[in-house]
Image (spheres, helix red, strand yellow):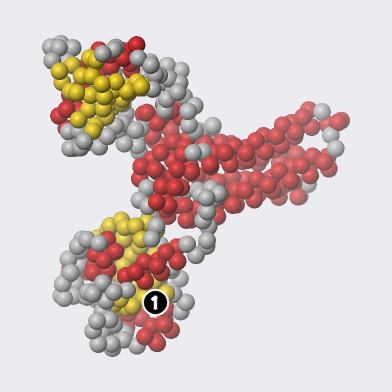
């Protein structure tokens, strides 16, 4: 497989201490040599060393940048190709000038994710590990980062390959028995098929048990802050974000639209949605905000319902409590710095077994208790530990769900005495679905789509 040489800026654009221009391909070292001047030519230095020198403009011989250049010869590199990384001063002008020079000397500007794509196509990593790279970049909490690191390290890949090998051995046994039926003991074949199919089914179930937590760690828990106007919803958002993101006033109906913000609460990534106060109103703009609040409520995975400690429980409050009856929710009774008028006994009755937290957001009281309640609610299943293989990617979850269904059909077919060649169809289908997770059997269009989500230079 042959590729041209690609180049891109691999660090964020803007001012910084260091910026890196990365090249990968057979001609990476030769192209870099054309614009580099140091004690030795890059083609003569040892692999995996860093050299001090200057980037020069070959046309004018003028110095463009003072640099440190890393030279890494394939196949002991991320892409399994020759790689050169030019470390220059951070800044828009300097790094772009260096990139332009290497492009002028024959490199091509890399597409988004093309370095990681080459690592996959050259067999350095499989598809699930490649997806772990982007998950690592986008991780919003330490736990999310650990999940991504486990995937990048090949934890999921090893599990999938073990399951595929078990299925492959089963298929091979069936094919031998189909070709040489005179040597086959039918009962022994059926027992082997059932044993392997049930093993794969159990292992897929274990992986899917982590899917809910894994997906939330990867994407964030959609959390709607709801309540009547002026109960402290925007104050709650500001307290959790530790920044004044939302306007807070004593005037009911200040929040007219939905405000979204990501926040890390005790290792749980929340996609906070501050909604307009839900009430009947004649104001056209506020009506639109209220309707959007209702839509956010339907889409939320966690509800933070805010009530007013200094007001009696209203019909709107009770209606909201009923609306979230079958949803994960925490009830927050805010404004405890004011005189109590709410009936907490009635609140507990309506809340059923949900957590109730009292707060005074004005005085920053009760926020720690709220964060702990969120953590306990999220990690209630206790699926944690260093040896857990998390599944967090929606594509992986969908494929595992299909594979589980397929192997379940194989189990039913065996138990109902179906011919082994019919069972083999479901076993083979399961093997193929698992292969799509690690990229052993996947369409080129899907590969292009996946890597297009990466940032330029990765």
Q: Is residue 148 above or below residue 365?
A: above
x and y percentages locating residue 417 in the rendered image: 78, 46
Nearer-the-camera pick, 423 or 141: 141
Mark 1 neighbour density, 10 Å: few (under 14) some (14–19) many (20 or more): many
x and y percentages locating residue 165 in the rendered image: 65, 35
Name the residue: 23% across, 24% down: 67
Q: Is residue 244 above or below residue 166?
A: below
Q: Disc 1 marks which residue?
A: 356
Name the residue: 83% across, 43% down: 187
Nearer-the-camera pick, 201 or 333: 333
x and y percentages locating residue 8 in the rendered image: 28, 27
Name the residue: 38% across, 16% down: 46
Where is residue 63, by image quadrant? top left
265 to the left or right of 257: right
Q: Is residue 7 above or below residue 441?
A: above
Badge 1 element: strand
Name, please, the residue furthest toward the front.
39
Name the residue: 65% across, 41% down: 426
Where is residue 6, by image quadrant? top left
Where is residue 244, by image quadrant? bottom left
326 to the left or right of 261: right
204 to the left or right of 211: right
Nearer-the-camera pick, 210 or 371: 371
- Would residue 1 be visible to someone looking at this image? yes
274 to the left or right of 153: left
Quadrant, the C terminus: top left
Nearer-the-camera pick, 363 or 301: 363
x and y percentages locating residue 363 in the rendered image: 23, 75
């Amino acid at each position: 497989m042959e590729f041209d040489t690609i180049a891109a800026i691999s660090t964020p654009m803007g001012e910084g201490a260091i910026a890196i221009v990365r090249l990968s391909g057979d001609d990476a070292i030769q192209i870099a040599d054309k614009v580099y001047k140091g004690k030795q030519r890059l083609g003569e230095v040892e692999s995996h060393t860093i050299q001090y020198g200057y980037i020069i403009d070959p046309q004018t011989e003028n110095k463009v940048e003072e640099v440190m250049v890393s030279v890494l010869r394939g196949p002991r590199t991320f892409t399994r190709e020759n790689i050169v990384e030019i470390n220059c001063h951070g800044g828009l002008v300097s790094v772009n000038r260096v990139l332009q020079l290497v492009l002028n000397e024959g490199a091509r500007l890399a597409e988004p994710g093309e370095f990681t794509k080459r690592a996959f196509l050259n067999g350095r990593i499989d598809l699930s590990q490649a997806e772990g790279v982007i998950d690592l970049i986008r991780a919003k909490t330490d736990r999310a980062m650990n999940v991504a690191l486990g995937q990048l390290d090949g934890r999921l890949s090893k599990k999938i390959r073990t399951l595929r090998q078990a299925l492959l051995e089963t298929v091979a046994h069936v094919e031998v028995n189909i070709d040489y039926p005179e040597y086959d003991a039918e009962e022994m074949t059926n027992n082997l098929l059932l044993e392997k199919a049930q093993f794969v089914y159990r292992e897929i179930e274990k992986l899917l048990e982590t899917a809910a937590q894994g997906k939330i760690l990867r994407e964030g828990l959609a959390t709607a802050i709801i309540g009547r106007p002026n109960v402290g919803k925007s104050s709650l958002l500001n307290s959790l974000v530790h920044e004044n993101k939302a306007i807070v006033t004593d005037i009911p109906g200040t929040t007219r639209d939905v405000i979204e913000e990501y926040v890390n609460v005790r290792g749980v990534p929340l996609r906070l949605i501050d909604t307009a106060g839900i009430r009947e109103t004649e104001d056209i703009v506020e009506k639109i905000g209220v309707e959007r609040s209702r839509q956010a409520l339907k889409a939320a995975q966690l509800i933070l319902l805010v009530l007013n400690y200094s007001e009696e429980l209203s019909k709107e409050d009770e209606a909201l409590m009923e609306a979230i009856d079958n949803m994960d929710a925490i009830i927050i009774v805010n404004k405890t710095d004011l005189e109590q008028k709410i009936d907490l006994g009635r609140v507990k009755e309506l809340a059923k077994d949900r957590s109730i937290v009292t707060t005074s957001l004005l005085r920053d009281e009760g926020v720690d208790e709220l964060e702990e309640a969120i953590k306990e609610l999220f990690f209630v299943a206790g699926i944690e530990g260093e040896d857990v293989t998390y599944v967090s990617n929606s594509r992986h979850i969908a494929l595992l769900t299909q594979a589980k269904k397929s192997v379940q059909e194989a189990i039913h077919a065996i138990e109902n005495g179906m011919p082994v060649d019919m069972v083999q169809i479901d076993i083979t289908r399961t093997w193929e679905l698992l292969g799509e997770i690690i990229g052993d059997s996947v369409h080129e269009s899907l590969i292009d789509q996946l890597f297009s989500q990466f940032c330029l230079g990765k």
